[in-house]
Amino acid sequence: MAGMGSRKGASPSFYSSPPGGGGGSGYAGEFSSYSFGGGEADLSVSEQNFESFDYANQAPQPSGDAGYYDPAKSAPQYFVPTVPPTGAAASEFESNFEDEPPLLEELGINPNHIIEKTRSVLNPLRTTDAAILQDTDLAGPIVFCVMFGFILLLSGKVQFGYIYGIGLIGCVGMYFLLNMMSVSGVSLGVIVSVLGYCLLPMVGLAGVNLLLSLQGIIGTVLTALAVLWCSLSASKLFVTALAMQHQQTLVAYPCALVYGVFALLAVF
């Protein structure tokens, strides 16, 4: 008990120097004494010194805009449309624009030639320019073939494959035949164009089939007239384009065979 009393009476001194024995870099406070009495601790702090920082020895801050994004110096680029030319430059620009060919002509479609060929088919006795017939225009033939197949479809006949197949065989046969008969020769595009345009009377025959049957006497007469009309128009155009004088009858016979097959599609 006496030993314990002597411990209580003792007032030891802790942390008289900073931890680690360093001078000035750790704790600078000094705890003078602890007194334990009556089971309660009495802590008195004699002195507290806080470390001060010297801002003068710090590293210099980066000057200017080094390492930073400046939106004022990196402004985005915008598209600025050019001003239309004026004066002589404007007149040259407009003249170049006006000299450009129409869009249909660039696509190989000439509406005037289409109208002239259609009128020549509707009137076989009409005189047609040979230069127009040399134009390998396929817009009219495609339209007439689609119309012929569509009208047959309205009457319950799906004949698109037969139309294209018979047309292909007929064009190839007429190509070889006319090349042997003519002196100058003919291209396959001219054959397809002429035979396709002359299919127009057959389109009318298919339209009549929607109204009445073509398997009677009236239908037979109308079918014969349509075949004669198509073959006469086609032979007239071939003779004019190839300068085959006095050979229209020889050309009309194979044309009648080709259009006779199309007439069978319309009748049956």
Image (tube, rainbow, N blue to C red):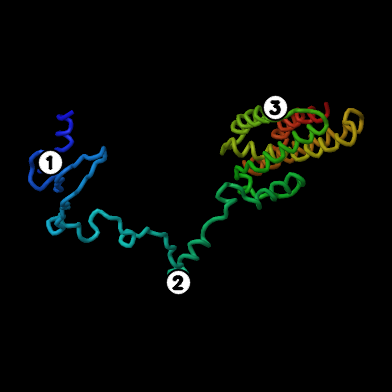
Q: Counting residues from the N terminus, which is met first, the one under dot 3 or under dot 2? A: 2
Q: How many marks?
A: 3
**Residue type at tag 3:** Gly
Counting from the top left corner in percent of width and height, residue 14 is at 14, 40
Q: Counting residues from the N terminus, which is met first, the one under dot 1 or under dot 3? A: 1
* Mark 3, residue position: 161
Locate the N terminus by quadrant.
top left
Horizontal side of residue 160 vs 100, given as left or right:
right
Horizontal side of residue 50 vs 165, given as left or right:
left
Between marks 2 and 1, how big is the CA–CA gap? 100 Å
Counting from the top left corner in percent of width and height, residue 246 is at 69, 39
Q: Check residue 40 in the rendering and tell me which mark sits there, or answer none.
A: none
Horizontal side of residue 192 vs 50, given as left or right:
right
> What residue appears at the point 44 percent right and 68 percent down from the top-left corner?
85
Instruction: Determine which quarter of the picture holds residue 135.
Output: top right
* Mark 1, residue position: 13
> What residue appears at the point 10 percent right and 48 percent down from the top-left corner?
24
Between marks 3 and 2, how big is the CA–CA gap? 58 Å
**Residue type at tag 1:** Ser
Q: Residues within 10 Å of mark 1 (few under 14, many from 20)?
A: few
**Residue type at tag 2:** Thr
Horizontal side of residue 213 vs 13, given as left or right:
right
Locate the C terminus by quadrant.
top right
